[in-house]
Image: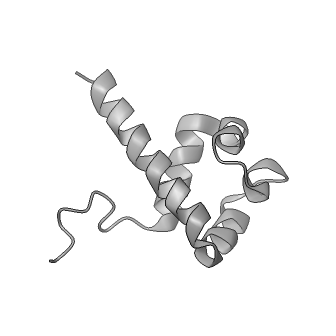
Amino acid sequence: MNGSNDPLHGLTLEAIVTELVAYFGWRELGQRIEIKCFRIDPSVTSSLKFLRKTPWARAKVESLYLFMRREQARASR
């Protein structure tokens, strides 16, 4: 399998976090995924550092990203 069926294929974690912040904002992001790097002095850099070391948090971020994309697709119909 070459990953082309994976909706996250080719996306960097930085791109995912940046899009989530643009869509939800740090405040809502911190409410949806309760991790310190989203709630206390949030930045993309600190978030990436944490998410790269924390598989469960990264999985939540990726899941929320896919949810956001579905919502955007639904809204554009």
Q: Residue furthest right?
A: 40
Q: Position of residue 76 (x, y in %)?
A: 28, 24
Q: Position of residue 72 (x, y in %)?
A: 36, 32
Front in this rendered view, residue 26 or 3: 3
Front in this rendered view, residue 42 or 32: 32
Q: Which quadrant would the N terminus be assigned to in this image?
A: bottom left
Q: Position of residue 65 (x, y in %)?
A: 45, 48
Q: Quadrant of residue 67?
A: top left
Front in this rendered view, residue 61 or 13: 61
Would residue 19 be found to the left or right of residue 74 on screen?
A: right
Whether 57 is drawn above or below 66: the answer is below
Whether 2 is drawn above or below 33: the answer is below
Whether 27 is drawn above or below 40: the answer is above
Q: Residue at x 84, y 52 (%)?
A: 40
Q: Which quadrant would the C terminus be assigned to in this image?
A: top left
Q: Residue furthest left?
A: 1
Would residue 12 be found to the left or right of residue 35 on screen?
A: left
* Color encoding of the figure: one colour
Whether 69 is drawn above or below 2: the answer is above
Q: Residue at x 59, y 45 (%)?
A: 21
Q: Residue at x 53, y 37 (%)?
A: 23
Would residue 63 be found to the left or right of residue 22 on screen?
A: left
Q: Residue at x 33, y 36 (%)?
A: 70
